[in-house]
Image (spheres, rainbow, N blue to C red):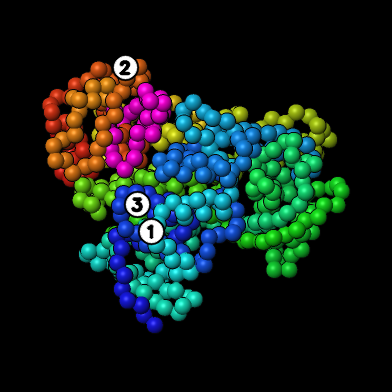
Amino acid sequence: MTGTDAETAVLIVGGGPVGLTARALLERWGVSTLLVERHRALSPLPRSRLVNVRSMEIFRQLGLAADVTSRAFAPRYGRIRFRDTLRDGDFATAAMIGVNEPVPESPEIGAVTSQDRLEPVLLAAARAPVRFGVELLGLTERPDGIVAELADRERGETTRVRTRHLLAADGANSTVRELLGIGTTGPGAMRGFTTVVFDADLDAWCARQPAGVYFTAHGLFAPLYPEGGWAWFAPTPEDPDHADWPGLVARALGPGPETRVDVLRVGHWVMNGFVAERFRHGGALLAGDAAHAIPIVGGLGMNAGIADAHNLCWKLAGVLQGWAGPRLLETYETERHPVARRTLDQAVANTRLMLQVQHRRRDQHAAGDPTAPFELPWSERYFAQLGLVLGVAYRSPAVLPDDATTLEPPDPGTNYVPTPEPGRRMPHLPLPDGRSTLDALGEWFTLFSPEPDRWAPPTAAPWPLRVEPLRPEPAEHLGLGSHGALLVRPDGHIAARWDDRPANDAALADALAAITRRVAAPKR
């Protein structure tokens, strides 16, 4: 049976955190969407475990941060502990900076929470239609958009959907990426892993030393929910269909009293590491794991995908609503592809350092001195990674550099220094009414200036724009003169900067036109 044709502005393929975030963002812009997910429901597996501080800022913009935090662990769980077995004491530990306690660079704090607790919050954040159990079979590109063929396996129906743009958030084994013939670069499939979700009373070894992850020689253990539950992550055995999962988990816990292990579910998956060669093909755009599969160490993959959606959705809205030119979408790949490469490199480095921990610990045991002080192969701030998640610097036609703008994005490292430079995330500063500068951002461009009357929105301008007054102190902190201004994009990145009074009254309109690709960039 073939259903009647449907139409939507954006078809989102994939109902994980990235697709659901894109759906919520686009609904805020008034863009019609349809999300299809081949599974019949949200995933019951915990999967990703960390929502970093930048993702929490995005969820704050959507009004979701408090709901995410209410379902998450307390900040004291923002720590990783290293043990020989779960029943042993720590031989080392490290804080997850920006998760274990607030940082002055942000109004938000990251959260340790399971993906199966995050996804229902994101699903409830928008009313746009979602169709579970629906799989993409094929797509045809046309001059005015894409026609996607969808199959509802349960109903035995196929439907054609016409859409202006298709957003592929369908995971590392992306059907969309395969249909478009987009290749990948990187290590590829690295190893098969199994996640075992189980119940057991482990308070005697963990309650007084909480952590988001316990890294042992026999796999990773992670508490799942504040009220209870555990997950064990380990390499998949040779014959997983006949494995004694309760016995394997019990042995992995280490020697000690018999502990009852109730296995609730088991999931097998492959850890991938790659970046797609392209993030766009015509009207189709890749985001999240479809664009870049990131190894799990460091909790970077899902968060990078959420940042993809934040970067992309305002651009899609601008093109669809006519206040941006079609070429604005070219800046999505220009800006996010280098970030994906750096994120993959960081995750691979994280994995190597974790292996170093194992090797050093084995050497310590071999030397007969397991109680000697253990030195981790990184500084305490290694797990901060704030430079990677807050220090992103975009370089594209959607950013107008000034004379002081660094030409090349810096190596983010582990530290983050707030910088009011075009391309960078707007620094967090308090406003007179107690809000953060980040709270002034939304579905619009925001212009911050100590002289707001001087920067009135251009008459009959098509762009969504709000002007936010700055007091002298934060203006000085941002390096602005009494007549200067910062123009910030809807995704929170600075688009243009005027240290003081611009050369002419058309400067703001010219900048917005250039940034949104409605006209050629003005001559400098």
Residue 128, labelled with which disc? 1
Residue 16: within the magenta?
no
Looking at the image, the residue that sits furthest to the right is 257
Q: Could one spot residue 313 in this view of the protein?
A: no
Which amino acid type is shown beneath numbered disc 3? Leu
Q: Residue at x 78, y 29 (%)?
A: 372
Is tag 3's residue or tag 2's residue first in the polypeptide sequence? Answer: 3
The residue carrying mark 3 is: 26
Give the side of residue 291 with respect to residue 354, left or right.
Answer: left
Which amino acid type is shown beneath numbered disc 1? Ala
Q: Residue at x 81, y 32 (%)?
A: 371
Q: Residue at x 40, y 29 (%)?
A: 435
The residue carrying mark 2 is: 472
Crowd band around label 2 with a 10 angstrom C-alpha radius: few (<14), some (14–19), many (20+): some
Pointers 1 and 2 in contact (C-beta within 8 Å): no
Where is residue 161 shown, x and y percent of the image? 33, 69
Where is residue 384 shown, x and y percent of the image? 54, 33
Residues in magenta, as a range: 419-448
Which is more toward the observer, 106 or 311? 106
Q: Secondary structure at mark 1?
A: loop
Where is residue 258 shown, x and y percent of the image? 86, 52
Pointers 3 and 1 in contact (C-beta within 8 Å): yes
